[in-house]
Every structure is written in structure tokens, then in C-alpha cells.
């Protein structure tokens, strides 16, 4: 209810009065904290994916490793790497 007029505001009218995060100016192509955080998130996602792939590689049998053309020694060497190592 609007204190000045005593009328009820429509919800879309009341929302227009308040600024939101979406109203903040955007600078296309700016290099700032958001791009750094985005790159960090991508890197973390890639590390997590590599870790999962290496864990699955350890679970493969010798027969399956032969099917993909990898020896047990190569699979063990790859699986022993840290997730951030390429």
C-alpha cells in the first residue's frame, strides 16, 4: 500500500522503483574479477573432469585397456597424475 495515496501498488509498478543488480552498467569485453572467476571456474571444472577420467581409467581391466590401445603401465602413469596436470 502506498502511504501517500492510500492505494495499493501493482507488483510490477513497485518493482520498477528499486534498482537491481541487472541495472548495473556492463562493460563488454572488460577484464575484471568476473572474467578471472569465470576462468577459475572453467579450470576447476577441467581439473575435476580429468580427475574423474583418471579414476575411471584405473578401473578398466587389461582387456578394456587393450581395446583402447593403452598398456597397464601407461594407464597407471596417467592415473597417478594430479588433476591439474595435463
Image (cartoon, rainbow, N blue to C red):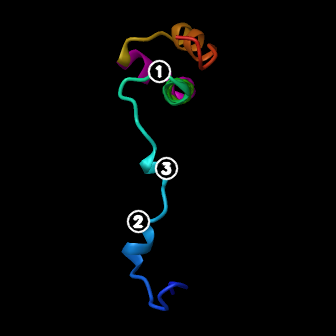
**Sequence-earlier tag: 3 or 2:** 2
Separation (CA) of disc 1 from disc 2: 30 Å
Q: Position of residue 22 (x, y in %)?
A: 43, 49
Q: Is residue 32 left or right of 11 when viewed as pictured?
A: right
Q: Cβ–Cβ below 8 Å for labels 3 and 2?
A: no
Q: Which residue is mark 1?
A: 31
Q: Position of residue 21 (x, y in %)?
A: 49, 50
Question: In the rendered image, which residue does mark 3 sit on?
Answer: 21
Could you tell me which residue is drawn at 41 percent across and 78 percent down?
A: 11
* Residue 57 pos. (x, y %): 51, 24
- Per the image, is 73 magenta? no
x 37%, y 17%: residue = 68
Does residue 73 lie above or below 27 as drawn?
above
Q: Earlier in the sequence, mark 3 or mark 1?
A: 3
Q: Are marks 3 and 1 in contact (CB under 8 Å)?
A: no
Label 1 neighbourhood size at 10 Å, few (<14), some (14-19), many (20+)? few
Residue span colored magenta: 53-67
Q: Nearer the viewer, mark 1 or mark 2?
A: 2
Amino acid at each position: 500500500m502506498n502511504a501517500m495515496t492510500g492505494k495499493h501498488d501493482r507488483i510490477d509498478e513497485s518493482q520498477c522503483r528499486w534498482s537491481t543488480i541487472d541495472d548495473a552498467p556492463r562493460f563488454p569485453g572488460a577484464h575484471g574479477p568476473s572474467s578471472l572467476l569465470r576462468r577459475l571456474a572453467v579450470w576447476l571444472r577441467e581439473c575435476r573432469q580429468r580427475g574423474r577420467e583418471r579414476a575411471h581409467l584405473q578401473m578398466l581391466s587389461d582387456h578394456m585397456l587393450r581395446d583402447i590401445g593403452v598398456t597397464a603401465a601407461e594407464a597407471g602413469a596417467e592415473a597417478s597424475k594430479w588433476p591439474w596436470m595435463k
